[in-house]
Image: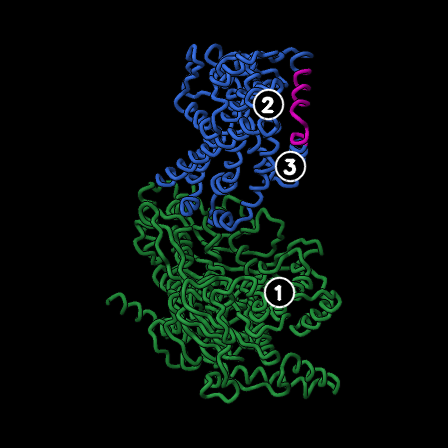
Chain colours: A blue, B green
């Protein structure tokens, strides 16, 4: 088991390295291919009508004229050890995970990412709890009462959940519960959990439910299909033949087997969401990573986009790592092939 | 809760011992129907039987006979499904029909325990064997401590012959072999000392030696624990040595019942007779069987049919057979060039020192080591003969056949086909060869694409080899469909419309459409009922005559292999331990392993079966002493 974890960990590190290469290629090479030279890139930092001297200084500082390999090395070592920007006159130090400076605000990207992470994290964790609990239990009930009114109603609702976009359900819920009946705040604000847990939850209820609705719908359908398969397995018949009560047959024998594939999907979904729930954050004007990324894209702020991309990739890789380990723990057969 | 509920049951049991006449299971007028799209289907049609205390009853029938529906009914496992069960079932004095779910649950595993078929899927893959055994005990004896339950599970595993039970109890099902899982399932059934053990096809998926061990084990358990046994199987030879009374089921009815010796020696019902006739016999040689098949083929041509039909029959026999008319007589000896006038030329296929190794990960740091699935195998195969390859799972017989077809490239050694070295031929150059060497696989359900009509499935080979004329393809396919015993109108049907035996005929047609020289049959009949098995084997025999085919016949069933093979190779752990004329292998086996296999083969005569059992016990005893 330890060997298995170790191997997965090593694979995760390699994967992250590959991610840095891809991200670097996209953000440093693609503008070149699009015909923007190092002057053009440097000009982005300076704003309107840059002087040649200013451009030269920026190029010097960011090593924009160095060969690609050197730039990549600077980029990666910056992520790990921080970076010194030496423009001759003064030296600017950028701390350990250095994602560079925003084109727009000329401030370091990393602290801004860290500012927004708690918002996205709060949103993701709360929504995940709701959608897993709701989705799985509805899925199980639907599977056990297949063809019943409950099953049909649940699956219809699930279909609606999957097909209605978040900005629609989000806006409707805002209109109803924030304007018509002003129970919840209209969004745009975020209270830290450590400051006031109650206000934190109160402000997030609508986004949580909106986001969870979509995912709960998908998870309900997945769980239902999985349970229907599992309950037809021979080992379920064995469990019944032992004289187990139906509840135990379902929970201990059925659910355990049906949940394993769901864990995999959950790892991916959750990891991705930690990189920013773009639609939900935009709809509810939450200052999270997703909204940060959208604003950055709109403003052509490459370093910020790069930062969000990197952090999303890291979360997905980490969540996958956790899922792999969990999976091996849940399903002993996985360990053999490891 | 259940421990108090058990006390009366226990009391009843002792009463029952006093009055030995009380049956532990009695079924009267049991009728089971299922609703389907085509109306209600009757699976069991008003059957009645009793199982005496300590007695053993065999229920025998083919798939669809209602035997499994009956055994599920004994466990009350039709509850909650859409099956309609009427009639009365009484198990250890309790009537199932009127009982509440709780009473039925208390009974399951406690009074009557069921051991299921297919050990690969009947254990939960995510819990340890120990966990599943302990659960079976604790559900009925909640008062038992975990430590005691565990001890009992170890005892139970030990009882069914799992070596090192105290350690293996922590294993997961995938870490057990098929035979061990079946034992674990039996151990699970024994956890609560049930009065009746109900075993449904429990040896079907197992190798002969393991099958013999499991049957011996059941016999021991019955005599040691005074348990009653209900043994359900499609194979008369499996129940022959293990039960006192046998019930033969067909289409939901019991068509014959009685003492096992009487039923097997003097069957009365035609169905029982046909079942018995279909069981392949280890003591029947290839020559005898072929003579019988040929004689039966001649009969309809000369007697029953008119002049025209006779001509058609003759024409059919000439299809593909260059020398026409009389089929060449082949015996094992005749296949060897020096003794044969007919095929004195070079062998069709030569295999020399073939080895196939796979990398296996294991040990510390996951170092890979070589595992030889096939180790240094050599043989010659001559035009028109059948080489049987017999061995248990893991013996390398399937790997060997895949090497011959070059689905696998041997690690070392040579394979010559018609004098040409094909060992490392590139895929492109192999293509003409694929026409000459075809395969028939074991599972007729999964080896046909469910979304492709059988006509297209069979015709695909022609297309691959360059035939473009769709009409011509259809004509050829339909001709062949008729030849393998199906109808031309089946051309546009999908595989799900066919039974197992019919699918295997389709698979045979698919292999023959290209008129191959060599056909490799990998367990072609092991998934089929005995009577279907017999029909398919006959067909293969006839086709060999008509198309002048050469077969490699891979199987684990010794009797089947004997009946189709001129020569037999016995494989174990990747090596051929014995290769000789079929009769020589079966009548005077040279290798210990061959003898062991032959001792394990089930026999139809109950007295003989008991003798075999004694011989196996002696063999085991001797190897334990050594």
User: Magenta span covers which residues?
Assistant: A160-176
Mark 2 belongs to chain: A
**In this rendering, which labeled residue sits more in front, label 1 or label 2?**
2
Taking the spot 47% from the left edge, 32% from the top edge, the residue there is A317
The secondary structure type at the circle numbered 1 is helix
For disc 3, the marked residue is A151
Taking the spot 53% from the left edge, 23% from the top edge, the residue there is A308
Quote the CA–CA distance across marks 1 and 3: 37 Å
Q: Quadrant of the C terminus of chain B?
A: bottom left
**Residue A37 image-quadrant placement:** top right
The secondary structure type at the circle numbered 3 is helix
Is residue A136 one of those drawn in magenta? no
- Look at the picture and state if A324 lies above or below B117: above
Instruction: Give how far across and how far down residue A82 sits, in percent.
Output: 41, 20
Upstream in sequence: badge 2 or badge 3? 3
**In this rendering, which labeled residue sits more in front, label 1 or label 3?**
1
Which label belongs to residue A278? 2
In the rendered structure, the answer to whether residue B256 lies left or right of residue B149 reads: right
Which label belongs to residue B503? 1
**In this rendering, which labeled residue sits more in front, label 2 or label 3?**
2
């Amino acid at each position: 088991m330890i060997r298995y974890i170790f191997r997965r960990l090593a694979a995760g590190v390699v994967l992250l390295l590959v991610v840095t290469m891809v991200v670097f290629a996209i953000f440093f090479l693609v503008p070149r291919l699009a015909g923007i030279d190092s002057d053009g890139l440097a000009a982005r930092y300076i704003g309107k009508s840059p002087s040649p001297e200013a451009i030269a200084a920026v190029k010097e500082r960011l090593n924009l004229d160095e060969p690609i390999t050197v730039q990549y090395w600077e980029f990666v070592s910056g992520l790990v050890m921080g970076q010194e920007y030496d423009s001759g006159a003064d030296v600017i130090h950028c701390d350990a995970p250095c994602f560079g400076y925003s084109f727009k605000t000329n401030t370091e990207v990393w602290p801004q990412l860290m500012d927004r992470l708690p918002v996205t994290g709060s949103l993701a964790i709360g929504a995940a709890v709701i959608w897993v609990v709701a989705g799985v239990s509805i899925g199980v009930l639907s599977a056990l009462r297949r063809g019943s009114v409950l099953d049909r109603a649940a699956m219809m609702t699930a279909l609606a959940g999957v097909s209605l976009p978040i900005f629609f359900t989000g806006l409707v819920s805002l209109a109803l519960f924030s304007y018509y009946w002003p129970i919840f705040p209209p969004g745009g604000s975020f209270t830290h959990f450590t400051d006031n847990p109650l206000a934190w939850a109160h402000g997030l209820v609508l986004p949580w439910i909106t986001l969870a609705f979509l995912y709960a719908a998908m998870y309900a359908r997945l769980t239902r299909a999985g349970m229907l398969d599992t309950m037809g397995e021979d080992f379920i018949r064995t469990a019944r033949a032992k004289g187990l009560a139906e509840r135990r047959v379902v929970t201990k024998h059925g659910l355990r087997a049906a949940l394993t594939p769901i864990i995999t999907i959950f790892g991916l979904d959750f990891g991705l969401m930690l990189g920013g729930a773009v639609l939900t954050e935009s709809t509810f004007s939450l200052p999270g990573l997703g909204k940060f990324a959208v604003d950055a894209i709109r403003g052509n702020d490459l370093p910020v986009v790069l930062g969000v991309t990197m952090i999303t990739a890291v979360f997905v890789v980490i969540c996958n790592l956790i899922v792999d380990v969990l999976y091996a723990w849940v399903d002993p057969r996985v360990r053999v092939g490891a | 809760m259940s421990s108090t509920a058990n006390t009366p049951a226990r009391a009843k049991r002792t009463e029952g011992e006093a009055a030995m006449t009380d049956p532990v299971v009695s079924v009267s007028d049991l009728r089971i129907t299922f609703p389907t799209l085509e109306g209600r289907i009757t699976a069991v049609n008003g059957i009645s039987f009793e199982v005496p205390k300590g007695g053993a009853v065999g229920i025998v029938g083919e798939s669809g006979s209602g035997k499994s529906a009956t055994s599920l009914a004994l466990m009350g496992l039709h509850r909650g499904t859409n099956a309609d069960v009427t009639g009365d079932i009484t198990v250890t004095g309790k009537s199932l029909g009127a009982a509440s779910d709780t009473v039925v649950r208390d009974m399951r595993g406690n009074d009557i325990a069921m051991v299921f078929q297919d050990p690969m899927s009947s254990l939960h893959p995510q819990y340890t064997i120990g966990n599943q055994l302990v659960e079976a005990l604790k559900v009925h004896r909640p008062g038992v401590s975990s430590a005691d339950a565990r001890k009992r599970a170890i005892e139970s595993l030990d009882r069914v012959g799992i070596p090192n039970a105290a350690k293996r109890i922590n294993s997961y099902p995938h870490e057990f072999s098929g035979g061990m899982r079946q034992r674990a399932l039996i151990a699970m059934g024994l956890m609560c000392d049930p009065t009746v053990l109900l075993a449904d096809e429990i040896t079907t998926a197992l190798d002969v030696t393991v099958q013999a061990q499991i049957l011996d084990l059941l016999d021991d358990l019955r005599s040691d624990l005074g348990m009653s046994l209900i043994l359900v199987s499609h194979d008369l030879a499996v129940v022959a040595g293990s039960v006192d009374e046998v019930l033969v089921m067909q289409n939901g009815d019991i068509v014959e019942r009685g003492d096992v010796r009487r039923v097997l020696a003097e069957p009365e019902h035609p169905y029982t007779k046909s079942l018995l006739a279909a069981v392949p016999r280890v003591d029947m040689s290839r020559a005898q069987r072929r003579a019988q098949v040929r004689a039966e083929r001649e009969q309809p041509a000369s007697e029953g049919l008119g002049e025209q039909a006779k001509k058609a029959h003759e024409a059919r026999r000439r299809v593909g057979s260059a020398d026409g008319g009389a089929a060449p007589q082949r015996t094992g000896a005749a296949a060897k060039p020096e003794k044969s006038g007919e095929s004195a030329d070079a062998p069709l296929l030569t295999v020399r020192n073939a080895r196939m190794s796979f990398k296996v990960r294991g040990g510390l740091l996951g170092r890979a080591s070589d595992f030889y699935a096939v180790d240094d195998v050599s043989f010659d195969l001559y035009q028109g003969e059948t080489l049987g390859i017999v061995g248990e799972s893991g013996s390398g017989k399937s790997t060997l056949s895949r090497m011959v077809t070059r689905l696998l490239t041997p690690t070392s050694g040579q394979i010559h086909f018609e004098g040409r070295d094909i060992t490392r031929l590139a895929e492109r150059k192999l293509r003409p060869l694929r026409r000459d060497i075809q395969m028939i696989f074991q599972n007729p359900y999964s080896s046909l694409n469910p979304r492709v009509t059988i006509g297209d499935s069979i015709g695909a080979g022609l297309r691959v080899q360059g035939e473009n004329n769709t009409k011509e393809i259809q004509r050829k396919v339909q001709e062949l469909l008729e030849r393998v015993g199906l109808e031309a109108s089946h051309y546009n049907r999908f595989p799900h419309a066919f039974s197992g035996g019919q699918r295997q005929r389709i698979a045979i047609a698919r292999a023959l459409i290209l008129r191959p020289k060599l056909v490799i049959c990998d367990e072609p009949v092991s998934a089929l009922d005995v009577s279907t098995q017999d029909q398919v084997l006959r067909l293969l025999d006839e086709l060999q005559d008509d198309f002048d085919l050469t077969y490699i016949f891979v199987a684990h069933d010794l009797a089947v292999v004997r009946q189709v093979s001129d020569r037999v190779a016995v494989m174990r752990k990747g090596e051929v331990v014995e290769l000789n004329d079929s009769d020589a292998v079966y009548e005077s086996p040279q290798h210990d392993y061959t003898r062991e296999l032959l001792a394990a083969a089930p026999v139809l005569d109950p007295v003989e079966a008991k003798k075999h059992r004694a011989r196996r016990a002696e063999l085991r005893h001797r190897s334990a002493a050594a």
